[in-house]
Amino acid sequence: MRAHKGRFLDNIFMERLWRTLKYECVYLHVWETHCETRVAIRKWMTFHNHQRPRSALDGKPLALLYSQRNDINQPDQ
């Protein structure tokens, strides 16, 4: 059996993330240096993961869901 190469479902979440990053951050600013660009993108990624509310998660950010899942899967030793 051959693997399906180039299926859109394989990359849909990454494509959506990059599209959101471009429209909400990159296209709105002009940075002078690579360092400024890196800092701004890092700041946006932190917001995206730790503060941005998700309607599918009842208004909670992704990082909260991730930490709760890790707490369940890795109980104290």
Image (spheres, rainbow, N blue to C red):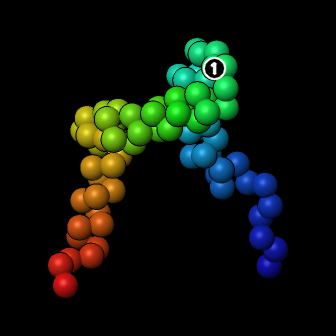
On screen, residue 68 above or below 11: below
Q: Is residue 43 left or right of residue 71?
A: right
As displayed, is residue 27 above or below residue 72?
A: above
Q: Position of residue 38 (x, y in %)?
A: 59, 35
The answer to whether residue 43 is seen in the rendering is: yes
Residue 21 appears in the picture as rendered? no
| Depth check, front residue: 6 or 66 | 66
Residue pointed to by mark 1: 31
The part of the image, by quadrant, that contains residue 10 is: bottom right
How many marks the image carries: the answer is 1
- Residue 39: image x %, image y %? 53, 33
Q: Is residue 38 left or right of residue 8?
A: left
Q: Which residue sits at x=25%, y=35%?
A: 59
Q: Quadrant of the C terminus?
A: bottom left
Which amino acid, mark 1?
Answer: Trp
> Where does residue 16 sit, x and y in percent of width and height?
58, 38
Query: Which of the two residues, 9 or 23, is positioned nearer the viewer here?
Result: 23
Q: Which residue is farthest bottom?
A: 77
- For disc 1, the neighbor class at 10 Å (few under 14, some 14 to 19, many from 20) is few
Q: Secondary structure at mark 1?
A: loop
Q: Nearer the viewer, residue 56 or 52?
A: 52
The single residue placed furthest to the left in the displayed view is 76
Could you tell me which residue is drawn at 39 percent across and 34 percent down? 47
Residue closer to the observer: 20 or 3: 20
Q: Quadrant of the N terminus?
A: bottom right
Residue at point 35%, 33% (across, down): 52
Give the residue drawn at x 28%, y 58%: 67
In the drawing, does residue 26 fall left or right of residue 44?
A: right
In this picture, is 9 found above or below 2?
Answer: above
Choose top left, top right, bottom left or bottom right for residue 2: bottom right
